[in-house]
Image (cartoon, grey):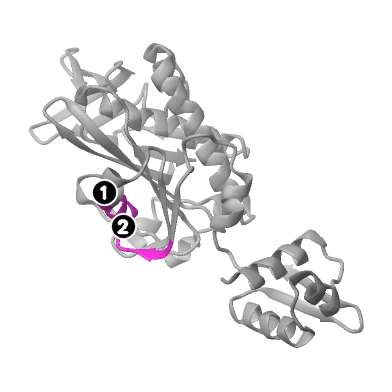
Amino acid sequence: MNDNKKEIVRLLKESEGSPVSGQEIGEKLGITRAMVWKYIKALRKEGFDIRSSPKTGYILDSSPDRIDPGELKKILQTSLIGKDIRYFSELESTNSTAREIASNVSEGTVVIAETQKKGRGRMGSEWQSIAGGVWLSLILKPAIPLENVSKITLVAGIAVTNTLRNMDISARIKWPNDVLVNGKKICGILTEVSAEVDKVDHVILGIGINANVKLSDLKYEIRKNSTSIVNETGNTVDRTVFLANLLYELEQQYIRFETKQFADIVDEWINLSDTIGREVRVTTPHKLIEGKAVGITERGALVVLDKNKKRQEIIAGNCHYSN
């Protein structure tokens, strides 16, 4: 969108439903009323519902459901995360793009896409990234040993869950990387790392949230276990504002991760957990572990008491509930 169209949208939004004349818009932008009309027609084609009020001007009734990177930068209340925002209408995968640029950008850079063609979850599982979601990857460069990277997934889970709970959505965390509402998945987190020996170069934190996603548009096998913000609340969310809130919460949790005792973070994760106390089946690359999930270690490993009452610590695996 060019600057004049952006400015027209801004003026109409600021009027809060009161008509703004073509002459007033033209004077503020330094263009003719004919040019104003040309831009109004173009905006309508882009999905903006702009009503013409006879003799008084234009009224913006609704905007298309898109993330506005310019507005995001304006309202974002962070110092590190989101300092550099890369916005795309469509990508193969935000994690793939983030990985390509990670070495050449500053920590806190965020890659956002309206849709992803090849969104993915852990272990190569499909993640359907259709219009209306929040699909992003965050580039982090923490000075931590490689074994501590799994902690960042826990931190991200807390941030997403807190953001949703601040909207009165009863979100809980399923180990290791899902956020659930009423037992259904609303968010997936995919953490990827680039490291040399024991030195972390960068971490790509991929987060996918079903915000205004229509469940009917998802494949059945995905839809049956999924939910969305609009499905839970009955209302669409302003995704730009939601993203600003999420990035703020991510920054607060990341600062906490770098400066506080991780035991405090573990305690909060347990309080928000949907997994602790459940009978689980966890599939790892080497074995199947069945038992009761009883805790989480400071490394982010799930602690399971197996059927022989033996303590098992699982750092990575697919977790399914038995009850």
The residue sitting at 69% across, 66% down in the picture is 7
Q: Amino acid at mark 1?
A: Arg
The residue sitting at 55% across, 50% down in the picture is 229
The residue sitting at 45% across, 30% down in the picture is 158
Q: Are marks 2 and 1 in contact (CB under 8 Å)?
A: no
Q: Quadrant of the N terminus?
A: bottom right
Q: Does residue 273 show up magenta in the picture? A: no
Residue 46 found in image quarter: bottom right
Label 1 neighbour load within 10 Å: few <14, some 14-19, many 20+: some
Which sits in the foreground, 240 or 118? 240
Res 99 label = 1
Residue identified by numbered label 2: 93
Q: Inspect this view and state whether residue 170 appears.
A: no
Q: What is the x, y in percent for residue 163?
A: 55, 37
Q: What is the x, y in percent for residue 4?
A: 66, 72
Above or below, comparing residue 86 to residue 166 in the picture: below
First to last magenta residue range:
88-100
Most extreme residue toward the front is 30
Q: Amino acid at mark 2?
A: Ser
Q: Does residue 90 show up magenta in the picture? A: yes
Most extreme residue toward the right is 55
Above or below, comparing residue 128 to residue 124 in the picture: below
Q: Nearer the viewer, mark 2 or mark 1?
A: 1
**Mark toward the start of the polypeptide (2 vs 1):** 2
The Cα atoms of the two marked residues, 2 and 1, are separated by 10 Å
Q: Is residue 301 left or right of residue 208?
A: left
Q: Secondary structure at mark 2?
A: loop
Q: Quadrant of the C terminus?
A: top left
Which sits in the foreground, 301 or 144? 144
Residue 207 found in image quarter: top left
